[in-house]
Amino acid sequence: MRQPRRSGWAAQSSITAWNSARMAARADPGAARAVLVSWDGKSVQTSIGVRVEVAGKASEAGRFDTVLIPGSELPPAKFVTPEVLAAARHLSWNTRRLAAICSGAFVLAQLGLFDGRRATTHWKVAADLARGFPEITVESDAIFVRDGNLYSSAGVAAGVDLALAMVEEDHGADVARIVAQLLVVYMQRAGGQSQFSASLTGPAPRSPLLRSVVDLICADPAYPHTVQSLAEHARVSPRHLTRLFRAELERSPAEYVAFIRFGTARDMLHAGCGVTEAAMAAGFGSSEALRRAFVARLGISPRKYQQRFRSTGTASVPAMAAAVS
């Protein structure tokens, strides 16, 4: 039997992405074993008050294949303590791959591990990271970033995207897809995609019913959504659903689906994906259909748009471990 990869999670205030490693082990027995450690070997209290038991001290944990350092709801100045830094330093010396989730990026930044590298963190503290550590190229709008063997992600949900990407790297897309299904989430978003989804740019749905329909569209824009299928999901008539869309979102259901698909494709182009890949993933069906949509909305082809974005590096993107305590 093959030796499972050993993943360390420094237990802190958030351990959400830990489930991805656990589910990888369930999806592919022998593939991975998740271990929680803390700087002092004592249990850790999460941000919601639940205490989590750990396997022991980070300094005594041995070698890991992957180490993840989560962030905290506390300001970095309070949770990045000498003890946490010492534990993270030891873990960084004993792993093949090192990642920071959310404000955990401040731990690796303080250790100098991100110097000369690209990294991201939650948008609320991205400016603080860039200001405090000018040696780091902070990609403030990315969901997650990989630079060599160092990884970083935005908020807690983005940590799941990062973990799924790691599972896919190690065990293939089939295992990652099973893990996503076990977690009841969709396959991960592209790492360079904006932290802000297209659904955040316009009016927000006010009713729970419409919110569930919008969530369905945003979760899988490539699905062939129709007014009829969306109405069946909401258990209302197509006419009633259309009235809700126009009243709350100022668009018809078809217009809203097209809006989300366009935003998804644009985010993927920002992330460096090819035009055909972006078109298929966003539900356009072909690169020609995406080209027509770009020309109609922006007056420029997706390829030229991507080239312009890359050449300036400043094109605007509309709002569209281990655990160490």
Image (cartoon, grey):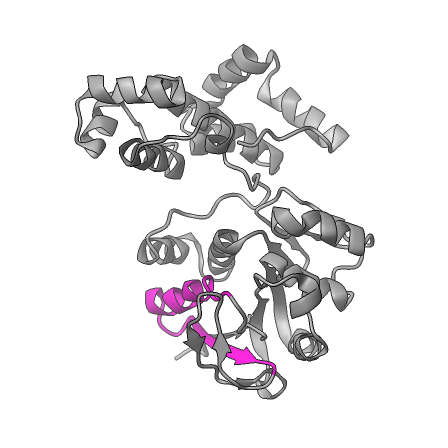
Q: Residue at x 57, y 85 (%)?
A: 61
Left or right, residue 216 beside residue 112: left
Q: Residue furthest bottom?
A: 60
Q: Residue at x 41, y 21 (%)?
A: 258
Q: Residue at x 58, y 70 (%)?
A: 67
Q: How many marks are shown on the rendered structure?
A: 0
Q: Choose between 283 and 35: the one closer to the eye.
A: 35
Note whether residue 120 is visible: no
**Residue 163 percent across, percent down from the top left:** 49, 59
**Which residues are the magenta region?**
14-39
Could you tell me which quadrant the C terminus lies in? bottom right
Q: Choose between 11 and 189: the one closer to the eye.
A: 11
Note whether residue 170 is visible: yes
**Residue 275 percent across, percent down from the top left:** 55, 28
Up/down of 152 relative to 232, above or below: below
Up/down of 30 relative to 215, above or below: below
**Residue 110 percent across, percent down from the top left:** 75, 66
Could you tell me which quadrant the N terminus lies in? bottom left
Left or right, residue 103 beside residue 25: right
Up/down of 52 relative to 207, above or below: below
Query: Which image quadrant for residue 153?
Result: bottom right
Query: Which image quadrant for residue 300?
Result: top right
Q: Residue at x 32, y 58 (%)?
A: 182
Residue 4 highlighted magenta (yes or no): no
Q: Choose between 260 and 96: the one closer to the eye.
A: 260
Residue 25 highlighted magenta (yes or no): yes
**Residue 286 percent across, percent down from the top left:** 44, 23
